[in-house]
Amino acid sequence: MTTIITPLSHATQTYTGIRRLLWLAILMPILVSGCGVADKVEDVTDKVSDVAGDTVATLDGAIDALERNSSSWQAVLQDTTKQLTADAQSTVRNEISNLLNRSVAATGVELRCDADFIGTRVRQALVRIRAHLLNQTVPPVEPALCHVVPAAVDMALDANRRNKLEFFGYDFDTTPIKVTLQDKSRALDVSSNLDRLTHYHMTLNLGANGVPVSKASNRVTLEWQNKLISSIAVIQPATPVCREKTETYTRNTYLSYTPPHTRGDKEYDGHGPEVWATARWVNDGTHINLRLWMKAKETRSDWTTAEGVRVESYYTAPSGWRIESIEGNVESSAHYVDSDHNDDRQGGGPNGPVKEFKFRGDHKGDDAGSYTGVDVYFNPLVVKLVEVANCAPESAVKSLQLKGLIAPDTTKRLQPMMLHIQPKAP
């Protein structure tokens, strides 16, 4: 299945009232004076339109910058705050300032989300702010997990040393999260024991008055809108280490995308366009999607632009397995200025999703929205898969060892299973 979307993320305010507030602020002195109302109302209309347009243009610039380099999110947010004009709705400026503070707070040592992850969430938040400003529909925000402490629960430990789970991530405060204790014969909803300390930090009480973990328990799961976002093994005396394997998936077909026209008269007329594209593999545990973004902008005149995002379902893990990670680079990009009417082969290479980008830029007649686009040819996708069963992942066992949260007897029992674990041959 293929969808064309623009991903959105958290913003605590809505901006549907920006024009209304500007009208009240500017019209009130006019109404009081009672002179030249018609002319002044026309001036006000232009002013409101200019302010809203400038604000959207500033947001668009920030969103583009993060699309090209998500790790620069902090500098982009700081620059965006400075660029907003004095006339801009203060709620927009405050929301971006809050987003900066929110994101900086989420980069603590325990969080362990990388800069690109934070940058992607920041970009989604800016898109959401823009959507509110333009009165567009905004979908719910999906919480994201980066790190769980401990990575598994060893029942051989003293109860006082396994009395809580800590979750670090992003946007925990936007929507309900369901927590379930999985036993041999039942699934118990224990969501009431989940405590959201901040938007990026949650704890789950496993103590005497918390989740009733017992010798029958095998895992704790977190779900959002019926989608599994985390699974934490409960290690019992007979729990094995999960099997692991590496799988290579090759797609021989190419993907073609023509982004929609977003600005200008649709004709580049020999003025470029300047072209950017980014392709990224996105892992959600059971599926990998390809997210392809392309922008082609005229280099002068009315700045004719085509820009959009395509999300393509790319790979599905086999039944009984979970995608632990993607081997190698997960992103490919290209950037150039078109100078003729020929197809242009750019970017790509042996690492990352894309072997080659083949662009269509300028030609005779209308371009943006109908002709300008890209064909993407893929490299093989190499994934690390982990068995989904009543078992403990090797990475979780190693994490427990580093933190001293696993009993010596458990380590001794599991150690032989952690040596080059591979699935048995059929």
Image (cartoon, helix red, strand yellow):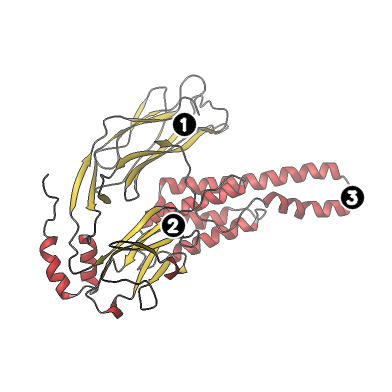
The circle on residue 143 is 2
Counting residues from the N terminus, which is met first, the one under dot 3 or under dot 1?
3
Q: Amino acid at mark 2?
A: Pro
Counting residues from the N terminus, which is met first, the one under dot 2 or under dot 1?
2
Q: Secondary structure at mark 1?
A: loop
Q: Is residue 310 above or below residue 112?
A: above
Residue under numbered circle 1: 273
The residue lying toward the viewer, choosing from 80 and 387, is 387
The residue mark sitting in front, 2 or 3, is: 2
Q: Quadrant of the N terminus?
A: top left
Q: Are marks 2 and 1 in contact (CB under 8 Å)?
A: no
Name which quarter of the figure residue 310 lies in: top left
Q: Residue at x 49, y 47 (%)?
A: 63
Q: Residue furthest front?
A: 185
Q: Amino acid at mark 3?
A: Gly
**Label 2 crowd bin: few (<14), some (14–19), many (20+), radius 10 Å:** many
The residue lying toward the viewer, choosing from 13 and 305, is 13
Q: Quadrant of the C terminus?
A: top left
Residue under numbered circle 3: 34
Q: Secondary structure at mark 3?
A: loop
Q: Is residue 194 visible?
A: no
